[in-house]
Every structure is written in structure tokens, then in C-alpha cells.
Amino acid sequence: TIASLTAREILDSRGNPTVEVDCILENGICGRAAVPSGASTGSREAVELRDGDVGRFGGKGVRKAVAHVNDIIAPDLISLDAREQAAIDETLIGLDGTDNKSHLGANALLGVSLAVARAAAMASDLPLYAYLGGPAATRLPVPHMNILNGGVHAHWQGADFQEFMIAPYGAGSLREAVEWGAEIYHALLALLEKRGLSVGVGDEGGFAPHVRSNEEPLELIVEAIGAAGLRAGPDVGIAIDPASSEFFKDGAYALHTEKRRLEAGEMVDYYAKLVANYPIVLIEDGMAEDDWDGWKRLNQTLGSSIELVGDDVFCTNPAIIARGIEENIANAVLIKTNQIGTLSETIAAARLARDHGWGAFVSHRSGETVDSFIADLVVALDAGHIKTGAPARGERVEKYNQLMRIEERLGIAARFAGLDAYVRPVR
Ligand code: PGA
Ligand code: ZN
């Protein structure tokens, strides 16, 4: 049973405050969790409560959310059984009382929800992935490593697209996939240096060079894969997250590298050309969150051949995902715990997708901590693929390192998702 819940303000990878929660049980076990934070957020995400006091952290303090855990949530959860995750999450949702968790803050709720799960797993003497996923949780995901950052994560005019990820699905194990990814990352570093391009990194640890087109990063990555002694296509694929809501302005897609505005149909053609010319297996947020017609067109054109993941458009929200499934606008959902605010709802979102033949792609945020909860979560959900940044920077590699530990612990039971990671077969 829960003896105490304590929240505090800590720093995330961007130097912004975030919430950390300790859940201590009667027997002394302590489960700890920290909450991530996005930069290119969907407008329907659960609300991340910030103090708004510009005298501290430019208004980004989280003392209110911390106080909500310590003063409002903790008294209600003390003496409950930590294994009752569903009931605890229901209580959190009830205490907040709003649709978007704006009263207590999704950052307050999520910190508690995840810390409770960690404590319960420890009390059950199980690794977190097994506590959440049961004995069937044995499949390691293909890591999608964001090695080239653009958009709002680059902090200057680089690529329009936010994320260029490598997917080492041809590896024989998670460990080998991580090794390939790190080798490609270093090959890309050498290539950028040779070309006189910047090797400074963006928020997710990928390089953020000043490229002049959205094809240039794809060419660089294909070359880096080759330089690492691997084959672009059969061994390693590419996934992109344009995060297109960020450049969707007044009903069109404004690409600064192209110096033009594309209508939805033109944007779909633009992607189709990229998919024809590069080994792209997955596009996330190809269309903007409010452009459902555009999403339908994209899905009609590319949805039968590659995975189309909705992030900003669904916000890990089961109600919105249900509508997306009904209207057939995509074939996969991104899964981010803090977009919805409790573990139970996160799991419900992934289940809903999988039950309808859709993919579930587990994700970090651009603002992270060393908390590796999502590494265990992706195995528990059997989701087959995860994105958690470059194979560099502590807050990114901690997730990949945890996945290697899980693979080791599973021993001969471990399987690597490989080409089966996707909802559409890789060509
Ligand atoms: P964010 O970006 O964490 O800054 O929202 C990640 C994404 O768009 O997938
Ligand atoms: Zn995204």
C-alpha cells in the first residue's frame, strides 16, 4: 500500500523545470518517475501546468503541479494498493475533473501514475516491462534514432522537417540495432565535417546542419548508412517526422527550403516522390493536426505501402483515435504518455490502435529526463517500434540502454521485431 507520494521540481534536458514523483510503499519500496515535455505539441494534448510566474524560469516553473501532488493527490491515494493502477488513474482523473487535465495538470497526474506503477512492479518483484505486459512481453522494438534534427528542434533555419530517423530493422537483435545506429551516427558526423556542415546538435541529440532542402538530409543519411558498411533499404530504413502542423499556415504547407506554399494535394505528391526515391518506411505527422482532409488524401495515396503515424492529430487520446479509425485517416498512432496524462489511458490508446489493425509507435518528448519508463512500456505493449532520439545524450541513450538490459534479462525468450515492426510490410 502507498505510504507517501512526494513531488519535486527537477530540470529536464532543455534546462526547463519538470515534475518528479516518489511513491513510497509501506514496506519502504520507492518508485520514482519524471515527466517529459514537448516543444511541437498538439493543441489537444492534456495540459502541462506551468506556474506562469515570469520571475522564475520565464514562467515555466512547475511549483503548482508539485503542490497539487503533495497537497491534493497524495492525501487521496495514501493507503491504496499500488497495484490497483486502473482505480488509481480513475481517482486522478476524478480529482482533476476536467477533460484536458488542466485543473491539477497532466504533469502532476502523470508523475504520480508512473511512479505508482514503478513501485507496484518493484513490490511484485517483477521488472517493469513484465509487470505491465505479463509473460508475453518478450519482443524488443526497432529503435528509431533521430540523427538529424530540423524544424523547431534545430533552433535555426535548417530542414523544414523536424526529424530524420534511422531504423536498423535488419539487425538480428536490439543490441545489434543500437550498435548499427551508433555507427551510422558517427559516420554522419564524419560526413558533415567533411562537407563543412555544422555538427551542433538539436534538442533530441541529432545533428542540426544548415541544409538547403528536405532531400539533403535524406541523401546524407543514405550515404552515412553506406559509410557504416550497411545497406540503405535492406538493412536500415528511414522514418521522418515532418511535424507538419508547425509549418501549416493559412491552409497550406509553407516550406521555407522550397520557398513555396504547398496545397494538401501537392504536399501528398511531395511525400510520394520522397518515398519513391528513398527507403522511407514511416511518415509521422505528414499532414497537420487540423487538416483531416489532407490526412485522408495522404492515407489514400501512401497508406497501403508505408506506415502513416498520427502524433499531433491524435495526442494519444482514445476518443480522437477512435474518430481517426472511423474516418480512416492514418494507419498508426504515436504513443506519448504525457499527451494524455495517465498510464491507463496511454495503454488504452495503444490497445485501441492495435485492436483495429493499426500500429502503435512509442515515443519520448523533445524535453526528456533520464527516466526510461517508455523502454519498458514499449516491450509491455508489444508495440514493435520506439523513437527516443539520437544514440547520444544521456536522456536519449538511457532508453536504448534500458532496452539492451531488458533484452539481456529476457535471454533466449527475447525476440527482435525487425521487419515486423510496421503495420505495412517494408518494400
Ligand atoms: P515534441 O516533438 O516532443 O517537441 O512534441 C516530438 C514529436 O513531434 O514527435
Ligand atoms: Zn511528432
Image (cartoon, helix red, strand yellow):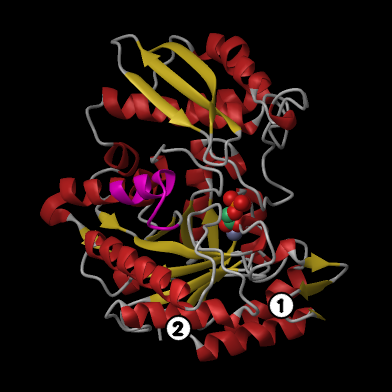
Viewer-proximal residue among 16 and 40: 16
Tell me which residue sits at (72%, 48%) in the image: 44
View extreme (right): residue: 250
Residue 279: image tag: 2
Distance (Cα) linking label 1 and label 2: 21 Å
Boundaries of the magenta span: 390-401
Residue 217: image tag: none
Tell me which residue sits at (71%, 24%) in the image: 56
Residue 91 figure quarter: top right
Element type where label 2 sits in the image: loop
> For disc 1, does the CB lie below 8 Å from ligand 1?
no
Q: How far from the left and from the top, in percent, is residue 395?
A: 43, 43
Residue 257: image tag: 1
Residue 290 figure quarter: bottom right
Position of 129 relative to 93 (above/below): below
Viewer-proximal residue among 355 and 333: 333
View extreme (left): residue: 412
Tell me which residue sits at (72%, 36%) in the image: 99
Disc 2 residue crowd, few under 14, some 14–19, many 20+, Cα 10 Å: some
